[in-house]
Image (cartoon, rainbow, N blue to C red):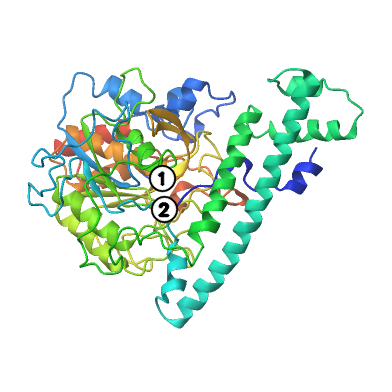
Amino acid sequence: MTRLFPKSVLGLSLASLLMGCGATALVSTPIENIDTTPLKIADLSEAQKQNWGHLDLVADTIPGMSVDKAYSEILKNKKGETIIVAVLDSGIDLEHEDLDDVLWTNKDEKPGDGIDNDNNGYVDDIHGYNFLGESYNEQLEVARIVKLKLGDAALQAKAKAEVEGEYAKAVQQKQQYEQIFQAVKNADAAVKKELGKNEYNKKDLAGIKSTDEAMQQNVGILTQMLTYEDSIPEVLKQIEGGITYFTDQVNYNYNVDFNGRKVVGDDPYDINDTDYGDGNPQSRSEDESHGTHVAGIIAAERNNGLGANGVANNVEIMSIRAVPNGDEYDKDIALGIRYAVDNGAKIINGSFGKGYSPNAQWVFDAIKYAADNDVLFVHAAGNSGEDLDNPANPNFPNDQVDNGPEIADNVITVGALAPKYGSEMVASFSNYGKVNVDVFAPGDEIYSSMPGSKYDYQGGTSMAAPAVAGVAALIRSYYPKLTASEVKKIIMESGLTPRAKVILGGDNAKTGNLEEISTAGTMVNAYNALIMAHNVSMGKIKL
């Protein structure tokens, strides 16, 4: 799984801490060039932060998908068909207050009887299937290549060098962040004692006039930290996230001696070894939050007074637990796609990816199988801030080989937008590529469901993909005769097309407009997509 490092303190070192004391026109909006849209100067309100991906660029000067506008002006008083969307991901909190009423239920299966009642090959699969068993922490595929000596000598040598280098870097970064955490924690305690209170702000820090050198350093540390987050507890949470990230890399991801699969009991490199897993795709811990967050972006119950609103109504979420805390296995992804197709999903969301795929053909074949059965596959572009058209930056699964023709017409790959319209609107972490990335959608700092009926912000192309899956679900719900291929084309062609240059990979020296860094050159827009879907369904527009 392409995980995003907690970005608020990304790149911070202890030393710096101490020293630093052509395109498709708009379908509906009568603006010929959206680059005339004014830039938003004020900070987003809390309500806007929690819902920015649903807002409208013209009305709100925020690069959202006009979801709220679509509901109020297009979908009002309309009824659509129920669409099953498979979330091929980590487990989902099936008891979450904002998801429990939007779960797919296999009505032909009797829960808990240990029998495959519907003869689909999977026992007790009530809300989906779990291909991970009780495993979760995993190696990256590159570490498996080293351990199992997969591929030829050149691949093994490349993998070995990468693993050794990244493992050493992770050990160093883990130590660095532990030192930062302790420094901030000590400074926080000292300042609280100095001020005589447990809560303080930048103004309080500026008012400390101590001549003590240690206290001056503490004030400098905390003042710098408050440029990353609004409070020191939030800063400490971010740093702890960094410690966890690098600890996982050391203990699991780049640890060639770790074997997270042994508890599953199968051979993950044998596609015919299918008697494994179970019918319980429930997330196993609060740390296993990814699938729950993704599911909420797609279909959290709308307007129920709780947490967040999903993009789509009329959706049933099928949970397929196949993505661990590390790289997914090709076999699990291939079988997960086929499970979704065979059990009625019309859209599959794949918010995962990796740089090595020893059995990519299994996944290619599964994608083709989905295409043959009119199922759309929405995939995250990845979070390395890289050009995927460069052969040195592969991201699997994809829908073509070596930048060649697409193997199927049902895959849409999504890069991530940030809420700041203008040159910084492509998220700094988002991958891009004229051939390999189709569109961009909101993906940075997205508010959605978390295990335990909680809510929080997460960012990544993992969040952008389900936003698009939600738009696809809306189209397929209200215009069910449209094919997966047509839905893909509508989403790509109906988006907004800014022509201004955007910063790529967080590097100010690298820029390009959306037409240069994606196939469609567009920002996904639900309002326009529904209008185009209507016109296509009525024969007014030919794709």
**Residue 514 as seen in the image, left or right of residue 19:** left
**Residue 223 as seen in the image, left or right of residue 175:** right
Say which of 191 and 114 sits in front.
Answer: 114
Look at 72% across and 30% down and name the residue there: 188
Disc sitting over residue 167 in the figure: none
**Residue 406 as seen in the image, left or right of residue 233:** left
Q: Is mark 2 on a helix, strand or loop?
A: loop
The location of residue 497, given as percent across then percent down, is 42, 41
Dot 2 and dot 1 residues touching (CB under 8 Å)? yes
The location of residue 456, given as percent across then percent down, is 46, 31
Say which of 94 and 48 sits in front.
Answer: 94
**Which residue carries the number 1 mark?**
462
Q: In this view, does 465 lie above or below 410?
A: above
The location of residue 149, given as percent across then percent down, is 42, 77
Residue 4 shows up from this direction: yes
Q: What residue type is labelled 1?
A: Ser
Disc sitting over residue 1 in the figure: 2
Q: Is residue 161 above or below residue 520?
A: below
* Marks 2 and 1, the one that precedes in the sequence: 2
Q: In this view, does 519 lie above or below 310?
A: below
Say which of 298 and 454 sits in front.
Answer: 454
**Residue 122 as seen in the image, left or right of residue 241:** left
